[in-house]
């Protein structure tokens, strides 16, 4: 099967009427190991290039802060990309950072995560902004991710979304520090950016 790439910023190609290609996890397993990040959302394949060094620096800083906090309190597990999260056969993502509580560690498989993490953190870039802010908000909300952080490197800020009965609501957008409602961790953004 030919891979039809959909990259942020590119016009979506014309599809012949009546034909719809849906990617599944089995197709995902056959994608090339070429340094790009592949994800499937609603059966659509999304491809973005490898992250830039500044993105990786931010990711490392957040992961280290979160890992130390979670380990010290024996709260669960923290993972970083690339790590496949299988939400369904047609929804396979690679969040930048994710946390799974001790009570839900059963979703950690040998090769991937099989279910929704408690917390997902995405570091935005021009190439992923629309995917992370629109598609993934709806996706993570649908599968019950309790908290979702959107990290904006350009503005040096973090928006925290919290899942409630009516979906996600914004806990706030922070430029200096914030406290996670889920983990009760205080994050100083000077240590992130």
Image (cartoon, rainbow, N blue to C red):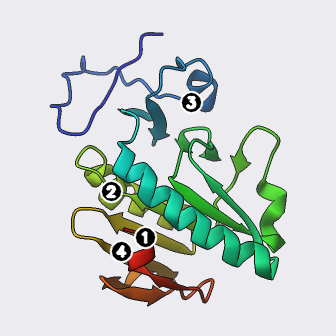
Distance from the alpha carbon under mark 2 to that under mark 1: 14 Å
Whether residue 99 is visible here, answered yes or no, is yes
Is 110 placed left or right of 124 in the picture?
right
Residue at disc 1, secondary structure: loop
> Which residue bears the numbered disc 4?
158
The crowding category of the residue bearing disc 2, from other C-alpha atoms within 10 Å (few below 14, some 14 to 19, many at least 20), is many
Task: Say which mark, if any, is on residue 124.
Answer: 2
Distance from the alpha carbon under mark 4 to that under mark 3: 32 Å
Distance from the alpha carbon under mark 4 to that under mark 2: 10 Å
> Which residue bears the numbered disc 3?
24
The crowding category of the residue bearing disc 4, from other C-alpha atoms within 10 Å (few below 14, some 14 to 19, many at least 20), is many
> Which residue bears the numbered disc 1?
192
Instruction: In the rendered view, tell whether residue 107 sits above or below residue 162.
Output: above
Instruction: In the rendered view, tell whether residue 27 sits above or below residue 151.
Output: above
Whether tag 1 and tag 4 are in contact, CB under 8 A, the answer is yes
The crowding category of the residue bearing disc 1, from other C-alpha atoms within 10 Å (few below 14, some 14 to 19, many at least 20), is many
Nearer the observer: mark 3 or 1; the answer is 1
Q: Residue 47: x percent and y percent?
A: 38, 32
Dot placed on the residue nearer the N-terminal end, 4 or 2? 2
Nearer the observer: mark 2 or 1; the answer is 1
Residue at disc 4, secondary structure: strand
Dot placed on the residue nearer the N-terminal end, 3 or 1? 3
Q: Residue 167: x percent and y percent?
A: 45, 77
Compare residues 109 and 24 and report the one nearer the observer: 109
Q: Residue 54: x percent and y percent?
A: 35, 51
């Amino acid at each position: 099967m030919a891979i039809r790439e959909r990259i942020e910023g590119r016009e979506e190609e014309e599809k012949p009427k009546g034909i719809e290609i849906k990617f599944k996890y089995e197709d995902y397993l056959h994608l090339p190991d070429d340094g790009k990040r592949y994800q499937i959302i609603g059966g659509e394949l999304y491809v973005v290039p490898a992250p830039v060094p500044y993105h990786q620096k931010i990711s490392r800083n957040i992961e280290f802060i979160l890992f130390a906090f979670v380990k010290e309190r024996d709260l669960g597990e923290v993972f970083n990309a690339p790590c496949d999260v299988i939400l369904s056969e047609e929804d396979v993502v690679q969040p930048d950072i994710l946390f799974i509580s001790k009570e839900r560690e059963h979703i950690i498989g040998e090769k991937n995560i099989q279910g929704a993490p408690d917390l997902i953190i995405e570091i935005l870039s021009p190439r992923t902004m629309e995917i992370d802010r629109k598609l993934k908000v709806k996706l993570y909300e649908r599968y019950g991710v309790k908290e979702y952080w959107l990290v904006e490197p350009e503005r040096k800020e973090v928006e925290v979304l919290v899942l409630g009965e009516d979906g996600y609501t914004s806990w706030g957008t922070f430029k200096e520090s914030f406290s996670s409602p889920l983990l009760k961790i205080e994050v100083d953004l000077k240590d992130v950016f």
